[in-house]
Amino acid sequence: MLVLVAYASRHGATQEIAERIAQTLVASGQQVQVHPASAAGDLAGYGAFVIGSAVYMGHWQKEAVEFVRRNRAVLAGRPVWLFSSGPLGTEPTDAQGQDLAAAAEPKEIAEFGEAIAPRGHRVFFGVLDPGRLGLGERALRKLPAARAILPEGDFRDWAQIEAWASGIARDLALGSEPAGSALGAEEQQVRHGRAPGAAT
């Protein structure tokens, strides 16, 4: 089946996670397209979805939220997995022992659970690259308290991301393929920029 990996990325880190997920799915024999959530187009040709977003202030990016809400009738009838990118640091818990990934779960996930019944949601650690920050974000990082909770660095665990994507591939391989979702063998690759049926 054809799988859509859709994402909303603020500074590029979540896009890179989406692309790695897509590459892992392709390596497992899936047919995959990768698109920003704002440019995904018609979803009729897709048999499954992986949707992800960067998380800021406890929320998914607007484009990803609108994508799910706008397409919930389609998504509710297909296999869907969600991922979020947000926490920073090298430890899984903070100084108070709180699980950072659990604390970073976006507020929209509960809503999506009821609306589209995703098969899973995973929070991945993210990236803070000062060179990619906007003026407001740079000003925030200058505050003493912010530096402690917003450490600089790339904290993505690529092995964890690939393992999660491999699990999705296994689930898809065990499931049935919706009619009309298949591509020819020559198209079994990650494709960017063109939704099924769109003009080149």
Image (cartoon, grey):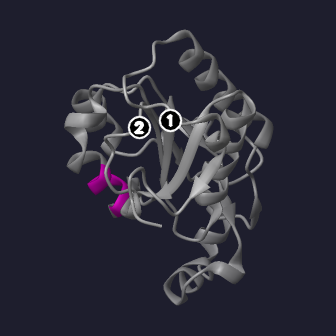
Q: Quadrant of residue 168?
A: top right
The residue located at (41%, 57%) in the rendering is: 37
Label 1 near label 2: C-beta < 8 Å? yes
The residue located at (60%, 50%) in the rendering is: 18
* 183 to the left or right of 97: left
Asked if 107 appears above or below 63 in the picture, the reply is above
Q: Which residues are magenta?
A: 63-67
The residue located at (66%, 70%) in the rendering is: 147
- Reading the image, the residue beneath label 1 is 2
- Reading the image, the residue beneath label 2 is 46
* 183 to the left or right of 29: left
Q: Secondary structure at mark 1?
A: strand
| Amino acid residing under circle 1 | Leu
Answer yes or no: is residue 94 visible. no
Asked if 73 appears above or below 151 in the picture, the reply is above
| Amino acid residing under circle 2 | Tyr
Q: Quadrant of residue 139?
A: bottom right
Residue 19 image point, x, y percent: 65, 51
Residue 108 image point, x, y percent: 31, 44
